[in-house]
Image (cartoon, rainbow, N blue to C red):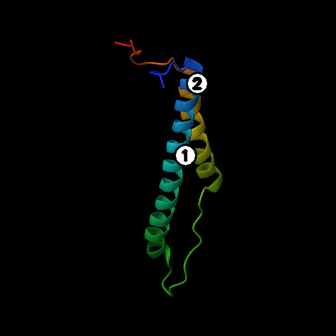
Amino acid sequence: MVAIGAPPRTLRAVVAGQALYISGLGALVGLLAGTVTGLALARPMTTLGAGDPATIAVPWLFLAAVVVGLPVLASAATLIAPVAGRRWSGV
């Protein structure tokens, strides 16, 4: 986009959108993989002698804050940071 003369504001918006998408997808996949793994490992450790599973407390509010907060933070950081990189000289 630099080669066609896009202004820095446009570059920041595109990079912020990419950061939001990539970090959001990573946070969501990480949440799902961690939840499945955590429940699969915690269930055998918390069953009582008769095989009755104990209640597992999952901090859903904290996990939701991390899954939403990290992508928003990454996107905001790219909007605030100056556009770095080499400018196309046209040569």
- Kind of residue indicated by mark 2: Thr
Task: Where is residue 88? Give x, y as percent.
Answer: 40, 16
Q: Which residue is mark 1?
A: 24
- Which quadrant: the C terminus? top left
Q: Secondary structure at mark 2?
A: helix
As measured in the structure, the alpha-carbon distance from the residue carrying label 2 to the one carrying label 1 is 21 Å
Taking the spot 44% from the left edge, 65% from the top edge, the residue there is 37
Task: Where is residue 43? Give x, y as percent.
Answer: 48, 73
User: Based on the displayed image, in which of its 4 quarters is residue 60 positioned?
Assistant: bottom right
Give residue 10's mark.
2
- Kind of residue indicated by mark 1: Gly
Q: Secondary structure at mark 1?
A: helix
Placement of 5 over or under 37, stated as above or below: above
Task: Where is residue 72? Give x, y as percent.
Answer: 60, 37
Q: Residue furthest front?
A: 91
Label 1: how many Cα within 10 Å (few below 14, some 14–19, many 20+): many
Q: Earlier in the sequence, mark 2 or mark 1?
A: 2
Taking the spot 50% from the left edge, 85% from the top edge, the residue there is 51
